[in-house]
Amino acid sequence: MKLLIKKSEIKRIQEHPGSTFHEYNLPFQNVSVGVSEISGRYPHSGFDVDQEVEQVWYIEQGKGRVWLLNSFYELSEGDMVLIPKGEKYWIEGTNLKLVVVSSPPWFPKQHTHISK
């Protein structure tokens, strides 16, 4: 089993302008980890929902806010956000860097965008 994943081995995914996700290819079946960089709002409008995946976001850098469970939460370095599966959310900030842990591993089929 591979025990070290180098930065040069990560997969870069450009989600939207102002939002980039770097995915680490882990050898585990129950969890995935990545780093998200956000400047502006993600998604740009509406909400995102992950129907089958729970997420933990650790704010490594920057400040911002997240809308989750009908409330706003102010974010700063060192904070952690818990995203329950099935809940709609959006996040905005300037030069935000998040460590994102997903369980089970995030996959596109369970991810939906809600325009309203």
Image (cartoon, grey):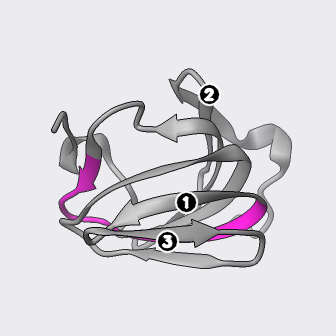
Q: Are marks 1 and 3 in contact (CB under 8 Å)?
A: yes
In the structure shown, which secondary structural element does the residue marked by tag 2 occupy? loop
| Label 2 with label 3: CB-CB less than 8 Å | no
In this rendering, which labeled residue sits more in front, label 2 or label 3?
3
Find numbered disc 1 in the image and state the secondary structure of the residue it sits on: strand
- Location of residue 89 with respect to 22 vertically, above or below: below
Q: Which residues are magenta?
A: 48-61
**Labels 1 & 2 near each other (Cβ < 8 A):** no
Percent coordinates x, y for residue 33 in the rendering: 58, 62
Determine if the magenta segment contains residue 101. Answer: no
Q: Nearer the viewer, residue 25 or 59?
A: 59
Which residue lies at the image location 77% right of the left edge and 70% below the top edge? 77
Q: Residue at x 83, y 46 (%)?
A: 7
Disc 3 residue crowd, few under 14, some 14–19, many 20+, Cα 10 Å: few
- State how far apart marks 1 and 2 are (Cα): 16 Å
Q: Which residue is mark 3?
A: 73
Name which residue lies at 62% across and 34% down. 20
Front residue of 74/24: it is 74
Mark positioned earlier in the residue sequence (1 or 2): 2
Up/down of 4 relative to 78, above or below: above
Q: Is residue 3 above or below residue 98?
A: below
Measuring from the top left, give residue 14's x and y in whole percent.
Answer: 56, 26
Whether residue 51 is in magenta: the answer is yes
